[in-house]
Image: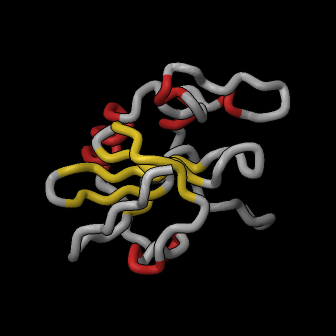
Amino acid sequence: MKRVPALPAQSTWHDAGTSVFPWVTRAEGRWWVLRLNHFPEHPLYTLFIDAQVVGDVDDVPDTWRLRPSAALPALTAPERAEVLALMTGLGPYGAEAGTPCEGDWCTCSILTDAYAARLNLPPRTSAE
């Protein structure tokens, strides 16, 4: 794996509202996107910068100040659409290398663009 680059100062992670690419930030005009992989079969995350794979990440650096999604600001609808368009076809692990995972032992096959575009909603309570 390549060394994880330092996140530029003043960058703030955002909740992208998708379980495939849950955290993104715009740093120095480029989109940094973390893909959540099917762990433990694959590394926990894959980092992309402007849809170019940087490498796999099991532990994000503390300096990234990545908090649970509930504590992060959400992307605007236009930003979310831009990120999803940028990441088209990159949902399954290995897609960035042209060999998306299709193993019976993992769930990568469901990570289609349509699945990635589904908006995460807060869990419903029994009163709803």
Q: Residue furthest right?
A: 105
**x then y, percent, for residue 58:** 60, 60
Work out whether 35 lies above or below 93.
below
Q: Residue furthest left?
A: 29
Of the 4 image quadrants, the one containing the C terminus is bottom right
- 62 and 77: which one is in front? 62
**x then y, percent, for residue 57:** 54, 57
Q: Residue at x 70, y 60 (%)?
A: 124
Horizontal relation, residue 109 to residue 91: left or right: right
**x then y, percent, for residue 120:** 56, 51
Q: How is the image coloured?
A: secondary structure
How many marks are shown on the rendered structure?
Answer: 0
Q: Residue at x 50, y 75 (%)?
A: 67
Horizontal relation, residue 111 to residue 113: left or right: right
Residue 108 position by quadrant: top right
Q: Residue at x 42, y 78 (%)?
A: 65
- 95 and 20: which one is in front? 95
Work out whether 63 lies above or below 28.
below
Q: Residue furthest front?
A: 2
**x then y, percent, for residue 107:** 74, 34
Q: Residue at x 69, y 44 (%)?
A: 42
